[in-house]
Amino acid sequence: MTMIPDRDRVALELALTQCRAEDADRDAQITAMLAERPWRQVAEFASTCCQSRALKLKPWQLSPCQIDVDDREHKQAASCCARCCRWASHVSIPIRWR
């Protein structure tokens, strides 16, 4: 098992907290998943949910944490995501989870 860097653990914990706060059904889903799956897998799912909601992604669009830049099929998504991240880093827009 690989160790999770502290900054990643903090981000995953925040994703879990935010995802559980979304509504009672999502909280129940996360609780059930934690009983059956490893913590990291559930936290990464929560991160995907938070990113999809925050970015208002369509069901077929990948969230940034799902993009594998080494996968040929994901290259276009990775390129688009990178452009958006570069743009966001140059403007003064607060990024919120909700």
Image (cartoon, grey):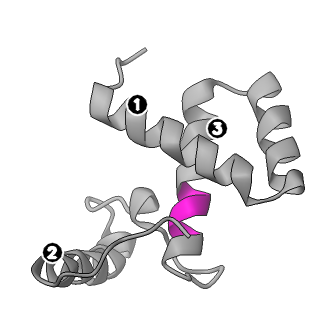
User: Which of the two residues, 60 or 14, is positioned nearer the viewer here?
Assistant: 14
- Residue 9: mark in rendering: 1
Foreground: disc 3 or disc 2:
2
Marks 3 and 1, how far apart in space? 12 Å
Q: In the rendered image of this protein, does residue 60 appear above or below residue 49? A: below
Disc 3 crowd rating (10 Å Cα; few below 14, some 14-19, many 20+) is many
- Residue 98 placed where, x, y %? 56, 70
Q: Where is residue 15 in the image (x, y as percent from the top left)?
A: 54, 47
Q: Tag 3: residue type? A: Val
Secondary structure mostly taken by the magenta-highlighted segment of the chain: helix
Q: Give the residue type that dot 2 points to.
A: Ser
Secondary structure, mark 3, is helix
Q: Is the N terminus in the top left, top right, bottom left or bottom right quadrant? A: top left
Residue nearest the viewer, comparing 55 with 96 = 96
Q: Which image quadrant for residue 57?
A: bottom right
Q: Relative to 18, say whether 67 is above or below.
A: below
Measured as percent of width and height from the top left, residue 49 is found at 61, 60
What residue lies at 85% left-to-right and 34% top-to-bottom?
Answer: 32
Can residue 18 be seen at all in this image of the molecule? yes
Q: What stretch is highlighted in magenta?
A: 48-52
Q: Name the residue under label 3.
A: 42
Distance between the alpha carbons at the discs numbered 1 and 2 = 23 Å
